Image (cartoon, helix red, strand yellow):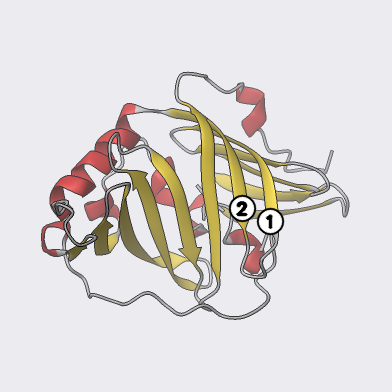
Amino acid sequence: MSRIWPVLGLCLGVVTSAGAQTSAPMNLGPAPASKAIARQAPGKPAVDPATAVQRANAYFNSHATIVADFVQLGADGRRTEGKLHVQRPGRMRFEYDRPATLEIIADGTSVAIRDRKLATQDVYFIGQTPLKFLLKERIDLARDTKILDVKSDDKSVSILIEDKATFGGTSRIRLVFDVNDYSLRQWTVTDPQGYETLVSLSNINLAQKPDASLFRINYERFD
């Protein structure tokens, strides 16, 4: 079960959920974005929660493609790197650098987790993954998820959301955006057991259109 969480945890166990359990984020209840608590460093201006969510939605909906480098940290402290390709709606690919042997592919309907070393492939419905809403054609965080918290400081704005319909139970995702342009820089997925997977993005390219072949899943055999 743990293999699915880092996927969209867009994203993103691929890295097993072993090691010490992290403390769960504080549950602020089913507050809409306009009522979420905004926290900021002393002396820094607060970011209005509703505005923050609107700007996050606008960023996603303005860019149908993302190509970026990523660094993933699992609950066991293991670090992996690779390249992320996103083509909304529904398509995504995580290519892990060696020595990792994994590939994660979403083709618009399903998500496949492939292990080249073991020659295995596990397939899930996109709706079972924790960040499925980020692959929608139009994204509305307040409508598609439950917003629990909005925080801000002089560098970033983070939005904590909850999804009760993911594989294995309720998951929580903290999305972190640059405070200036609201580009997505990082996310942390907390799985139903309380383990966290963190993914950070760099060298983000919003103009490059990924090749369509990157998102093809072979359902009949492993290549």
The residue that disc 1 covers is 79
Which amino acid, by three-letter code, is at mark 1? Answer: Arg
Q: Secondary structure at mark 1?
A: strand
The residue that disc 2 covers is 72
Sequence order check: which comes first, mark 1 or mark 2?
A: 2
Q: Quadrant of the N terminus?
A: bottom right
Crowding near the residue tagged with mark 2, few <14, some 14–19, many ≥20 C-alpha atoms within 10 Å = many
Q: Secondary structure at mark 2?
A: strand
- Up/down of 90 relative to 188, above or below: above
Q: Horizontal and vertical percent for residue 60? A: 34, 36
Q: Are the residues at dot 1 and dot 2 in contact (C-beta closer than 8 Å)?
A: yes
- Up/down of 83 relative to 72, above or below: above
**Left or right, 157 with reference to 201:** left
Image point (50%, 59%), residue name: 128
Which amino acid, by three-letter code, is at mark 2? Answer: Gln
- Which of 115 and 196 lies nearest the eye of the viewer? 196
Q: Horizontal and vertical percent for residue 181? A: 29, 34
